[in-house]
Amino acid sequence: MSGPSVNTTVVEVDTLPRPRPTIRNVAERAGVSKSLVSLVLRGSPHVSEHRRQAVLQAARELGYRPNAVARSLVEGRTHLVGALVADLHNPFYAEFLDGLQESLHGDGLRMLIGNSQWDPAFEDEAVEAFLELRVDGLVLLGIAPTSETLIEATSYTPTVVVGERDIELDNVDIVVDDDQLGARLAIDHLVEHGHRRIAHIEGSRASRCEGYLVAMRRHALAPYIMVEHGESTEEGGRRTARALLTRDPRPTAIFAANDLVALGVLSAASELGLRVPEDLSVIGYDNTHLAGVHHISLTSVDQPRRTMGRSAAALLSDRIQDPGKVARLRQVTPELIVRRSTGPAHE
């Protein structure tokens, strides 16, 4: 026995994507020429306010987005900046990028970010990707242009290097902190609290280690110099600190390469049953937001990272306008921010 018949209606749904609106569609909707639409989208002042508003309204209604590739071919610029960062896990770099992006945005530039993870192969790969996108400029943060790829890129792309001062390239601008002064501030503070056995965990900034050595010798503490190289990470700081703190005699204070390394030192001290600052004083570098967290309260050397970001943006914008400028160096002054991780020495 057959069941009741069922009328089935098949509804055909157009699944094809709608074509993107073009500049011609915008011109037709606004009742103007394509050339006038182009003038409006480029921000030309030679268009009446009435027509400008008509074009913008038509573009909004149609959902039109300018073709950035086509525009860059016409203008010879992409208004893009590639920022290559040594380690995005380091909050200093993230906070620096905030200042950089704010200023670049004000100059009509947009920022692309690449993370090298301290790997030269990733550095080259990221820079090649930036160049394929025809960026107007490069910012190398914590990375020195030493590979052939980076050196070649800087020869024809306006470039600013941040945090590395020993750059022997005529057309590359530099923004740095006075690392030697920062190290001296840290050592002076510890010596004032009676510390002599002050160790330094060296990271990627040789100038900070140089500042430590100079300061220790200036205080006649050369016999107590202890330098250990470690990775510029929290885990690297923890491993290196354990090696230092199991020496006999152990240091009573450690000056770390950065705040992440200093956090690793605090972890190692806790694992070994050492109290901070009663048994061990710890100083970091960068004064990131982590240093100010209440239960961490890390004494740290402050680099004005937003100021450095703004300086890098200004130098880069200037060099994009005039690539032939002589290379310039901008050096910022650090400041020691004292918190609860440092105290009197107990030999």
Image: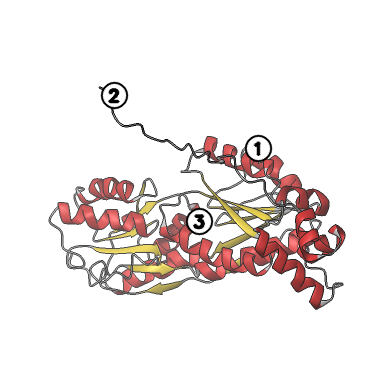
Q: CA distance from mark 3 to mark 1?
A: 25 Å
Q: Callout 2: helix, strand or loop?
A: loop
How did the renderer colour the structure? secondary structure
Residue to which mark 2 is pinned: 2
**Mark 1 crowd level (few <14, some 14–19, many ≥20, 10 Å Cα):** some
Q: Residue at x 34, y 54 (%)?
A: 261
Residue 136 relative to residue 226: left or right: right
Q: Is residue 70 visible?
A: yes
Residue 190 relative to residue 135: left or right: left
Question: Residue 141, percent across and down?
Answer: 55, 54
**Mark 3 crowd level (few <14, some 14–19, many ≥20, 10 Å Cα):** many
Are discs 1 and 2 less than 8 Å apart at CB?
no
| Disc assigned to residue 149 | 1
Residue to which mark 3 is pinned: 207
Residue 83 relative to residue 291: left or right: right
Q: Residue at x 40, y 67 (%)?
A: 287
Q: CA distance from mark 1 to mark 2?
A: 77 Å
Q: Which residue in the rendered view is the most extreme toward the top?
A: 1
- Quadrant location of residue 215? bottom left
